Amino acid sequence: MFWTTEEYFKGLRNALGDKPNRVWLSTFNVYAGITKNAIDVRKVYSITNHTANFLDQIDRLDVECNIMCGLPVFISCREDCPDCEQKKIDKLKRYKFTQQNWSGLNWKFVENFHLKYAIFEYEDKLRVFIGGRNLGDSDWVDLSLELADQETCQGVLDQAKKLWKSDEVLIEE
């Protein structure tokens, strides 16, 4: 069980240490320290961002990684509010710059998607993490788990593959 962001990312980094052949990730929203102006805050403020460091580690391994990211609903305070519209544009820019910063990974941004998983495919097994943790550095109370049963892990992988084929993509390379 992973109760904190730090514990969760430690588990994910451990799974990467076993050198998977493929990684599947899903999250609702993503924050990896990239701003709407394409600035990596880790370089400006010398801070740690678990998500960014994890994505860097995947990128260095040079394995196929498919990331599905659910987008929050954008609600305007009134019809045609320019401030609300600008906030939406800024958030979409941040997503696009995050995608560009880790362009070696495969990204899909979709609506109506709140699922969170991390699946690591190896030659002889799967490691699957599910639960409430997103790709972000939230300190909210939440829980994620690593599944032990390989049959259940395979079921999650099968569903991930079906979702990846979905046509409801908003931002793509």
Image (cartoon, rainbow, N blue to C red):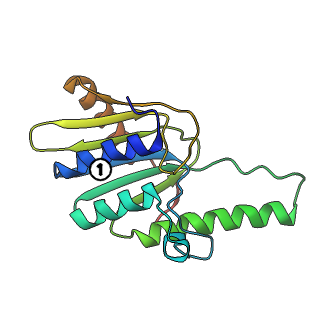
Query: Which quadrant of the figure contains the C terminus?
Result: bottom left
x and y, in percent, of residue 8 in the image: 39, 41
The residue under the point 15% across, 44% down is: 122
Query: Which quadrant of the figure contains the N terminus?
Result: top left
x and y, in percent, of residue 144 in the image: 42, 32
The residue under the point 56% across, 46% down is: 138
Asked if residue 29 is positioned above or below residue 97 in the image, the reply reads above
The residue under the point 14% across, 36% down is: 125
x and y, in percent, of residue 52 in the image: 43, 61
Q: Residue furthest right?
A: 78
The picture quadrant where one finds residue 130 is top left
Asked if residue 64 is positioned above or below residue 124 in the image, the reply reads below
- 122 sits left or right of 118 in the view: left
- 157 sits left or right of 20 in the view: right
Q: Residue furthest front?
A: 46
Name the residue beneath numbered marker 1: 13
Crowd rating for badge 1 (residues with CA inside 10 Å; few <14, some 14–19, many 20+): some
Q: How many marks?
A: 1
The residue under the point 36% across, 57% down is: 54
Could one spot residue 89 in this view of the protein? yes
Q: Amino acid at mark 1?
A: Arg
x and y, in percent, of residue 121 in the image: 20, 44
